[in-house]
Amino acid sequence: LYAEQLENWYKLFSKDQILVLDFSNPWRFLWDCLAARSFCRSRKIDTILDFEFFSRAGAILSYFLGGFMSRRIGLVSSSKKKPYCGDLYNDKINYNEHTHISKIYESLAKRVLQEKEYENIPVPLLHFSGVKVNKRLSLGLGEGLGDLGKTQVVVINPSFQDLLPLRAWPASYYKELINKLLRTNINISVLIVGKKNEVKFSQQFCSEFLPKRVYNLVGQSHSLMELMYVL
């Protein structure tokens, strides 16, 4: 996590619930990994969920933190053409690229919650009705959403600068998807969201659509809470 991302997460969880691994320096990263391993062992954490489905880093880190005594739940692909995260999980869930990632992540959580010792654990809900948003985002939302009684809103994050370009969907695919949505229903408005460093790309991307149908909100949400409010 980057520094600005940490501030967002600290608003959702207390600092003692978040372990930070600093990868800006290899020695610092190694030290943080050892500290995290010690933390997991001292707290007797017996289950680790790995939400990564593309690289092996999560699988290796899960094994290092929990060791062979822990339960490591991760995503694996049955196809040899798909990314392979190794064989370090002892509880595997099949990853299918045609299934929405929210459903896959839900299956990860259910694999844990179905156990008897966890079945009565309450799942906290996050509420965003009282979130204060910055003025620029508020104006953009007001212009883009219009009358919700007459408009269906679709929020899209094209990920113009994905950390792993190989897993990024081409911008042309997003354009085709948006055009299909606009043709299908005249009452649909599309909100484009993204990070601050993607503003330049988003301006060129959104310029190819009608301004009253597609609204550019890239870089206007200053925190994770604001983005969740948009969603």
Image: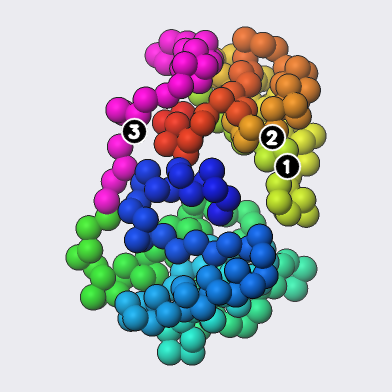
Residue 174 visible here: yes
Give the magenta part as a residue range: 124-152
Rounded to the nearest angstrom, the CA distance separating label 3 from label 2 is 25 Å
Query: For this rendering, which residue is in front, 81 or 163?
Result: 163
> Split into 4 quadrants, where in the image is the N terminus?
bottom right
Rounded to the nearest angstrom, the CA distance separating label 1 from label 3 is 27 Å
170 relative position to 144: left or right? right
Res 71 label: none
**Residue at coordinates 37% horizontally, 25% vertically from top-left?**
132
Q: Are marks 1 and 2 in contact (CB under 8 Å)?
A: yes
Rounded to the nearest angstrom, the CA distance separating label 1 from label 2 is 8 Å
**Residue at coordinates 51% horizontally, 31% vertically from top-left?**
222
Q: Which residue is mark 2?
A: 197
Earlier along the polypeptide chain: callout 3 or callout 2? Answer: 3
**Residue at coordinates 50% horizontally, 61% vertically from top-left?**
20
Q: Residues within 10 Å of mark 2 (few under 14, many from 20)?
A: few
The tally of labels here is: 3
Q: Which residue is mark 1?
A: 161
141 relative position to 79: left or right? left
